[in-house]
């Protein structure tokens, strides 16, 4: 009789567990609780009932959550691009168990509203070519092209040195995190054991960096914690091409700028005159706009559009903005409609004014908030 009662008790305890589902998450705090418009920021979210995976949801449009890292059932970190207008936004956590209540995150107005507010200083480098690491003024570069940053560091494609560099934002100290200066190659590996050809586009999600190697027609990934470099798409040993497909079966032709949203990586495939997409979960490559080998300036949807010389791109979660020849183009990520925002892809010049009247000369790097900024000259499109 005692054994029978014990068995019934054990069954009574176990039956609820058999039907147990994930707990509804709670969100109790966010740190920091604000950030400047246009910044890329990593925040810590604290609460309970978090699972792997969890999603971080913002109200409204314009905040691109690029990555979410599960730390524990009570802690997540998320990297996000604050491209939305200034104001207060609600934040929730979604898991298989449900959706949490909200906390408030505030996007502050950009501190820069006019070029007259800009004071230009040299942060790192000394005007001479080299590859020396060290404090800002003692470091040297050779053809730094693209940059990406988080809360603590800037990461630079030091193209002619064939390396990836890091600058500490707090101290200005420069270090080489991947590759070996002036030693080109295709080798995957860790830190100085890896090799690059000419690294151009660079973008990160807080955990990894993604780099376009224009010489070897590949997209590389660098794990920030370890410095481990791998090739995720393209082939360095086969001829340039335009094939879509998974990983090493895909082909590129001088890939340039890259930008991602945490799910997909977008690539300006310069000499193919196309915009490519890489699904980061599978490394599968597809062409979303333009046709390989068909150069032009036409606006249109997907393969009906033409690009002239797509060099760089940046996105806000809804659209891609492409520096194409002597123009700035927009690619809608929902319907892949391509439109020319400013300039003329095949007509060089320097003129401010309305979009159709403005002129550029080979604009390079792009970045935006409520406006798009492009280099090498300080030109804007509203």
Image: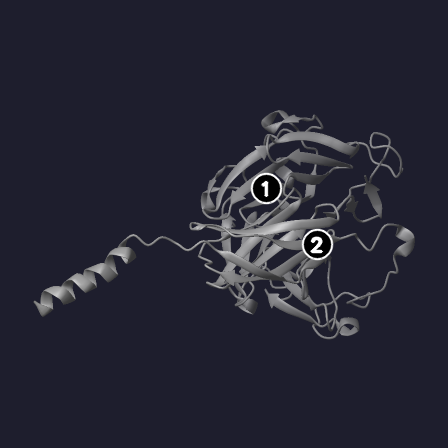
The residue located at (74%, 47%) in the rendering is 369
The residue located at (69%, 43%) in the rendering is 311
Which residue in the protein does label 1 denote?
253
Q: Is residue 336 above or below residue 246?
A: above
Q: Which circle, 1 or 2, is nearer the viewer?
A: 2
Q: Is residue 97 left or right of residue 289?
A: left
The picture places residue 179, in percent across and down from the top left corner, at 59, 64
Estimate the spatial distance between the alpha carbons at disc 1 and disc 2, rounded to whole Å: 42 Å
Residue 282's tag is: none
In depth, the one of 313 and 2 nearer the eye is 2
In depth, the one of 349 and 116 nearer the eye is 116
- Element class at badge 2: strand
Q: Quadrant of the C terminus?
A: top right
| Residue 318 visible at all | yes
The picture places residue 139, in percent across and down from the top left corner, at 74, 71
Whichever of callouts 1 and 2 sits on the residue coming sooner in the sequence is 2
Task: Please count the marks in the image.
Answer: 2
Q: Is residue 161 above or below residue 318?
A: below
Which residue in the protein does label 2 denote?
106
| Residue 215 visible at all | no
Please, which residue is most extreme toward the right here? 116
The residue located at (83%, 36%) in the rendering is 348
Say few, some or many: other residues with alpha carbon within 10 Å of mark 1 (under 14 / 14 to 19 / 20 or more).
Answer: many
Marks 1 and 2 in Cβ contact (< 8 Å):
no
- Element class at badge 1: loop
């Amino acid at each position: 009789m005692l054994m029978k009662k014990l068995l019934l008790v054990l069954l009574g305890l176990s039956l609820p567990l058999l039907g147990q589902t994930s707990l509804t998450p709670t969100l109790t705090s966010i740190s920091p609780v604000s950030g400047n418009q246009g910044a890329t920021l990593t925040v810590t979210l604290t609460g309970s009932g978090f699972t792997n995976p969890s999603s971080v949801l913002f109200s409204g449009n314009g905040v691109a959550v690029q990555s979410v890292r599960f730390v524990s059932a009570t802690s997540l970190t998320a990297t996000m691009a604050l491209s939305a207008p200034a104001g207060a936004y609600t934040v929730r956590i979604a898991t298989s168990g449900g959706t949490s209540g909200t906390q408030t995150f505030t996007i502050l107005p950009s501190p820069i509203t006019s070029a007259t507010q800009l004071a230009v200083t040299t942060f790192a480098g000394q005007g001479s070519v080299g590859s020396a690491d060290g404090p800002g003024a003692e470091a040297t570069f050779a053809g730094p092209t693209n940059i990406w940053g988080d809360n603590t560091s800037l990461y630079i494609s030091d193209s002619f040195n064939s390396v990836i560099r890091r600058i500490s934002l707090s101290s200005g100290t420069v270090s080489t995190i991947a590759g070996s200066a002036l030693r080109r190659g295709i080798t995957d590996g860790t830190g100085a054991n890896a090799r690059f050809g000419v690294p151009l586009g660079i973008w990160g999600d807080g955990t990894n960096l993604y780099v376009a190697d224009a010489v070897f027609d590949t997209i590389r990934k660098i794990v920030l914690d370890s410095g481990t470099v791998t090739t995720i798409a393209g082939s360095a040993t086969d001829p340039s091409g335009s094939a879509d497909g998974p990983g090493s079966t895909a082909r590129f032709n001088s890939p340039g700028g890259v930008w991602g949203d945490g799910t997909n990586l977008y690539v300006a495939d310069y000499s193919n005159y196309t915009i490519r997409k890489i699904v980061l979960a599978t490394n599968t490559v597809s062409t979303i706009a333009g046709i390989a080998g068909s150069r032009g300036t036409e606006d249109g949807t997907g393969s009906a559009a033409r690009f002239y010389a797509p060099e760089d791109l940046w996105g806000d979660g809804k659209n891609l903005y492409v520096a194409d020849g002597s123009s700035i183009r927009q690619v809608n990520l929902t319907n892949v409609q391509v439109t020319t925002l400013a300039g003329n892809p095949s007509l060089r010049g320097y003129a401010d004014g309305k979009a159709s009247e403005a002129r550029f000369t080979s604009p390079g790097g792009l970045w935006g908030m409520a406006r798009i900024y492009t280099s090498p000259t300080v030109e804007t499109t509203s």
